[in-house]
Image (cartoon, grey):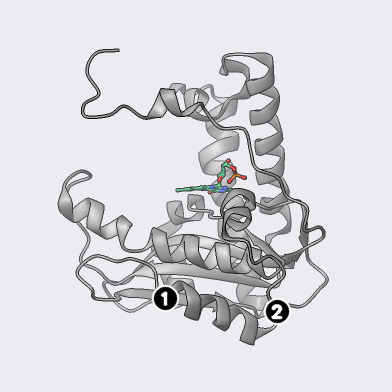
Amino acid sequence: MKLISDIDEVLTTTRAVRRRLNFDKPVERELVEECLRLAQQATMGSNLEDWRFVAVSEPEQKARVAALYRDTWEQTVEIPLRERRPDTVTRLDPGVRSNEEAQARQQRVLKSVKYLVDNLERVPVIMFACSAKPVPDTALGDRASGYYGSIIPIAWSFMLALRSRGLGSVMATAIVFHSERLSEVLELPEGTHPITMIPVAYTDTLDFKPAPRRPLEEILRWERWGSE
Ligand SMILES: Cc1cc2nc3c(=O)[nH]c(=O)nc-3n(C[C@H](O)[C@H](O)[C@H](O)COP(=O)(O)O)c2cc1C
């Protein structure tokens, strides 16, 4: 059942939800399928629909995924931060953010991410968005844009549809650090790769707010960017 029908409200309040996920309320399979059916209307490259989804709900399968996520956290966050590896410190360390407010915000995000890492197997449904497109051989260019640009929109539409129905989720790409092992766990066919994980649960509140964002003047210029 749709609880939030105002499109602007859905667009501005679909947060990355981790700590407010309700692990105890089962999520109906039909509801997940309804949200994905809506999301299938998303934009895509080449009109090919070469997106594939795997919804994980069995405890043993969730435990396998959760183990990979825990190892991802250790390898990509905990160890590099402890060893002060410069690229991780720049990306993730609250201490290097520009002001106190930004530092506190990053601290909260890290705590929230860790909470999900510690509790992933308790999430009722763990969705995986995968791509069956040929993998681009460069990080930039039309093939690269087409590759990721053909899967993230459907994932985001799925998250919006969930939000409108009182569920929460988070786009969690980090687990793709273990792309090959994840493909084995999900038994993906040759040439199909996981792009993002989307944990799905009812939320223990509907009261999410728009988040602070940069003023538009900082991210938009008309006609050309020009000099700083
Ligand atoms: C491409 C992408 C990758 C992300 N990866 C992760 C992730 O691995 N783990 C996680 O907990 N959140 C992840 N997020 C969620 C962001 O942390 C979150 O959207 C951001 O902090 C802004 O918060 P908000 O969406 O609530 O405004 C990701 C988001 C995007 C778009």
Q: Is residue 137 left or right of residue 49?
A: left
| Residue at left offset 69%, top offset 83% | 28
Tell me if label 2 and label 1 are in contact, CB under 8 Å: no
- Residue depth check, mark 2 versus mark 1: number of the one nearer the observer: 2
> Quadrant where the N terminus lies?
bottom right
Residue 187 x %, y %: 42, 78
**Residue situated furthest bottom in the rendering:** 30
Residue ID for mark 1: 40
Q: Is residue 26 left or right of residue 29?
A: right
Q: CA distance from mark 2 to mark 1?
A: 19 Å
Q: Nearer the viewer, residue 90 or 2?
A: 2
Residue type highlighted by circle 2: Met
Circle 1 residues within 10 Å: few <14, some 14–19, many ≥20: some
> Quadrant where the C terminus lies?
top left
SS at mark 2?
loop
Q: Can you tell which quarter of the image residue 49 is in? A: bottom left
Number of labels in the image equals 2
| Residue at left offset 81%, top offset 73% | 25
Residue ID for mark 2: 1
Circle 2 residues within 10 Å: few <14, some 14–19, many ≥20: few
Mark sitting earlier along the chain (2/1): 2
Residue 111 x %, y %: 71, 38
**Which disc, if any, is residue 149?**
none
SS at mark 1?
loop
Residue 85 x %, y %: 47, 24
Query: Above or below — where is 33 with respect to 219?
Result: below
Residue 204 x %, y %: 82, 60
Residue type highlighted by circle 1: Gln
| Residue at left offset 32%, top offset 56% | 148
